[in-house]
Image (cartoon, rainbow, N blue to C red):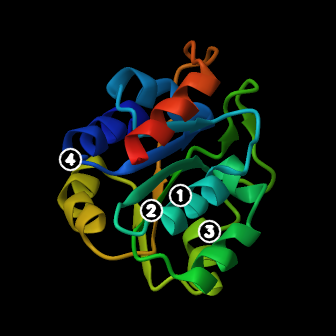
Amino acid sequence: MMERSKLLEIIAEMRTDEIVVATMSAIKDWKSLSSSPLDFYVAGAMGYASSVGLGLAIAQPNRKVIILDGDGSLLMNLGTLVTIVGIQPKNLIYFVLENRLYEVPGGIPLPAAGKYNLAAFARAAGFRKVHELKRLTDFRKQVGAILRGPGPTFASLRVDKGPSGPFPPINWAETARKLEKALQ
């Protein structure tokens, strides 16, 4: 398994002008790694980072969109996989950080954790580019091609449980205004 903060550090280092949509536990680390106006946070709407990311990918077809989602969030909105495949946004990269927990509300184990495979769900939905990575060295080797290649791309990233605690302070309205201004 990978340490989430190390994995996100690698993405932050390789990022250029992509929009990043982060949700739930990914917000904790990403907020400390990036202060870009192209960052957008989806919290309080668990399961919808993929839908928000898809909307941004449709609205901004010439700019890549990276979704940093959690496995618990994806399980709450599995239908988004089929929607993404139906639209085929070439600029969408969907990273799912799998720790098999609802981490934010206290590390509650996901139902049937370890008995299903989200990458297999993505393949069954019709994703042609699917990655399953459990080691940081493998992620480091493949992330450049994942970020540069055409999408839609799905990557299941097996991560350790991160530190507990609340979200960092975020002015949600200001974040949305910054993104809107950056995209004008």
- Residue drawn 21% across the image and 52% down it: 140
Q: Where is residue 149 in the image (x, y as percent from the top left)?
A: 27, 73
> As rendered, which of 82 and 63 lies closer to the eye?
63
Identify the element where label 2 is drawn: loop
Q: Name the residue under label 3.
A: 117
Measured Cα–Cα span from mark 4 to mark 2: 20 Å
Q: Are marks 4 and 3 in contact (CB under 8 Å)?
A: no
Relative to 25, residue 144 above or below: below
Which is in the foreground here, disc 1 or disc 3? 1
Of pointers 1 and 3, the one earlier in the residue sequence = 1
Q: Residues within 10 Å of mark 2 (few under 14, many from 20)?
A: some
Identify the element where label 4 is drawn: helix
Q: Do the residues labelled 4 and 2 touch (CB within 8 Å)?
A: no
Tell me if I can see residue 105 in this picture: yes
Identify the element where label 1 is drawn: helix
Direction from residue 115 to residue 34 in the image, left or right: left
Q: Mark 1 points at which residue?
A: 56
Of pointers 4 and 2, the one earlier in the residue sequence = 4
